[in-house]
Image (spheres, rainbow, N blue to C red):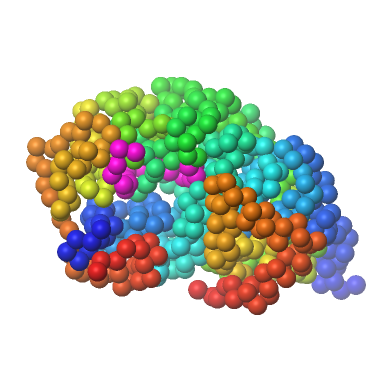
């Protein structure tokens, strides 16, 4: 959907990029996360350290990687470490500031499902599986999630917890000894944060042209709205130009171009 | 005999040769075995050996692949060789986010899945390689994984929670790599930045039986001795199969053939929706209809393969 010369996907990428500070160490996945991190790198955070799950550290990819094993991640990077080091020796030691995750479902307390929809034994949809997401959700200092906004993708409880958010809410996550947790959820309709006490997802900003009623109708529980609800800042012309001309010139990741 | 001749060359001469044919490479495979396969997404899958395995019509394999795996696992499932998979995911990234035969078999209850993520997968192989009854790990706590895998237990030690991850030891492992010598010294490509390897060593070290490696080319032992830091695995059975990872890529040699992945994905999705024809035709054309890898290469054409050759990036 195009609004005023940008697409919703471009808005999501731009909003996600704003979450990154210069100097952050970021665990990057392929697709929207990769676009967002590389946009931040070109806009305001030239000191970002990008780490990809295949073990490439300090990447500065000239083109967007098409695969987690893409050699373009290695060219110009600072180090190539065994895959396991990224989990055991970077994530586990608390060296990753921000992780980006997606999934098929995210629930009210930020738990992510990428395993099955429906009953596990006879699932309605068998999803691909965890990949490395579970470790990022458990061990990164902050997690930013991007997902579509519908009753199906944002249910009250996920069918399967692939990656832990705040579990049942409150202090349940901390009780298991897990720090960090989801910080922000960016959908195609709005941006959500988590209540510091209840750990419930709360609508913090709404994208231009979207009504509050529409967000509520497309969320699987009785959604709370922040008292200071704002409108999401749209991407700037410079951001749009970088996304289209430098990051994804062939439209591989963001296929819908604005007209 | 001069000093130089009594060195590497002479030592090599005394060592047993470990070169086998593709048929010999899969001959010890039996129904029900636990089989390790290389292949991280599109990279380094031992596809020529996988097609040879399918032609042997083995059944009920447990496949340990990945940690996030791709077409090597999906094709074995699609051909009916697999009972159980141990992997953090089966997917073709941007081509198709859920691999079609894996999805179909899982939704029909035809395969079992050991639910894990990439780290748990690696740790299970590490426990196997180290001869440990389990390893402890902090990730995965609070997820649904321990509920579904009865052999993964959540424990508390000094007030902290851990998962107890059991060992995995494949009976046989099949890998694809750029080079090896005739004595089974397998090595990565010279250009380290293009020659990424992923879980190959983890699988080989955990294996209780033979490690079989298809390579793009056999090199002389003297070349291995000249840069021992590139040696990845020792003592493998090796079989020379150029383009042996196709349609996957081989680190440092060629990139994945994504149009072929799309063709496979369409056939797999058609079968998942009820039309078995295209998938059966894929198997006939690229697997059953080929006596060996040379026939397979003819179905793809050398001209097309040459276009995939990696340029220095």
**Left or right: A75 in relation to B223:** left
Q: Residue furthest right?
A: B1
Please tell me in which quadrant of the rendered image residue A183 appears.
Answer: top left
Q: Residue at x 36, y 43 (%)?
A: A140
Q: Position of residue B206 (x, y in %)?
A: 67, 42
Residue found 20% across the figure and 66% down from its top: A5
- Quadrant holding the N terminus of chain B: bottom right
Along the line of sight, the residue nearer the viewer: A207 or B28:
A207
Q: Is B32 or A5 nearer to us in this picture?
A: A5
Determine whether, in the image, residue A72 is placed left or right of residue A45. right
Q: Position of residue A51 (x, y in %)?
A: 41, 55
Residue drawn at the location 27% of the way across and 47% of the way down? A187
Q: Residue furthest left?
A: A228
Q: Quadrant of residue B110?
A: top right
Q: Is residue B179 above or below residue B25?
A: below
Which residues fall within the magenta stretch?
A: A127-152
From this viewpoint, is residue B30 visible? Answer: yes
A128 sits left or right of B62 in the view: left
- Residue A130 magenta-highlighted: yes
Residue B290 position within the rendered picture, expressed as x and y whole percent measured from the top left: 77, 62
Q: From this viewpoint, is residue B35 visible?
A: no
Q: Residue at x 53, y 31 (%)?
A: A122
Residue A162 point in image, percent of width and height: 44, 36
Check if residue A203 falls in the magenta segment. Answer: no
Relative to A149, B73 lies left or right: right
Q: Is residue B312 above or below residue A73?
A: below
Disc tally is 0
């Amino acid at each position: 959907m195009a609004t005023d010369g940008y697409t919703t996907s471009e808005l999501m990428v731009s909003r996600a990029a704003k979450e990154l500070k210069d100097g952050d160490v970021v665990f990057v996945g392929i697709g929207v996360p990769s676009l967002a991190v590389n946009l931040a790198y070109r806009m305001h955070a030239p000191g970002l350290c990008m780490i990809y799950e295949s073990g490439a550290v300090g990447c500065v990819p000239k083109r967007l990687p098409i695969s987690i094993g893409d050699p373009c991640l290695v060219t110009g990077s600072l180090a190539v470490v065994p895959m396991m080091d990224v989990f055991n020796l970077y994530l586990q030691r608390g060296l990753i500031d921000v992780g980006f995750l997606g999934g098929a479902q995210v629930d009210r307390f930020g738990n992510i499902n990428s395993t099955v929809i429906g009953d596990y034994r006879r699932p309605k949809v068998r999803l691909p599986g965890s990949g490395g997401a579970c470790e990022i959700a458990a061990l990164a200092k902050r997690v930013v999630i991007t997902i579509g906004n519908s009753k199906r993708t944002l249910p009250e409880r996920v069918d399967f917890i692939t990656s832990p958010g705040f579990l049942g809410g409150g202090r349940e996550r901390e009780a298991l000894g897990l720090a960090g947790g989801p910080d922000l959820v960016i959908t195609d309709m709005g941006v959500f944060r988590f209540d510091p006490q209840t750990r419930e997802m709360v609508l913090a900003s709404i994208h231009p042209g979207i009504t509050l009623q529409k967000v509520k109708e497309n969320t699987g529980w009785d959604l709370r709205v922040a008292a200071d609800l704002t409108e999401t800042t749209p991407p700037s012309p410079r951001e749009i130009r970088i996304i289209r001309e430098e990051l994804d010139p062939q439209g591989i990741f963001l296929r819908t171009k604005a007209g | 005999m001069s000093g130089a001749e009594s060195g590497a060359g002479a030592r090599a001469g005394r060592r047993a040769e470990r070169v086998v044919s593709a048929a010999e490479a899969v001959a010890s495979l039996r129904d029900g075995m636990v089989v390790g396969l290389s292949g991280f997404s599109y990279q380094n899958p031992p596809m020529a050996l996988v097609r040879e395995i399918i032609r042997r019509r083995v059944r009920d394999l447990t496949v340990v692949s990945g940690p996030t795996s791709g077409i090597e696992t999906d094709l074995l499932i699609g051909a009916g060789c697999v009972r159980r998979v141990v992997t953090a995911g089966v997917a073709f990234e941007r081509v198709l986010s859920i691999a079609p035969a894996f999805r179909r078999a899982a939704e029909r209850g035809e395969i079992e899945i050991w639910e894990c993520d990439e780290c748990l997968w690696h740790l299970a192989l590490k426990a196997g390689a180290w001869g440990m009854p389990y390893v402890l790990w902090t990730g995965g706590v609070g997820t649904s994984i321990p509920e579904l895998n009865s052999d993964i237990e959540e424990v508390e030690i000094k007030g902290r929670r851990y998962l107890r991850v059991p060992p995995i030891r494949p009976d046989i492992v099949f890998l694809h790599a750029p080079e090896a010598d005739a004595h089974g010294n397998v090595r990565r490509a010279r250009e380290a930045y293009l020659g990424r390897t992923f879980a190959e060593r983890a699988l080989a070290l955990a294996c209780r039986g033979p490690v079989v490696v298809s390579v793009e080319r056999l090199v002389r032992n003297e070349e291995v001795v000249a840069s021992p830091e590139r040696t990845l695995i020792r003592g493998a059975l090796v079989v020379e199969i150029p383009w042996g990872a196709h349609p996957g890529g081989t680190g440092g040699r060629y990139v994945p053939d994504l149009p072929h992945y799309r063709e496979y994905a369409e056939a797999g999705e058609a079968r998942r929706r009820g039309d078995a024809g295209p998938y059966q035709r894929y198997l006939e054309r690229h697997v059953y209809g080929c006596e060996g890898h040379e026939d397979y290469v003819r179905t793809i054409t050398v001209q097309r393969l040459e276009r995939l050759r990696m340029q220095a990036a």
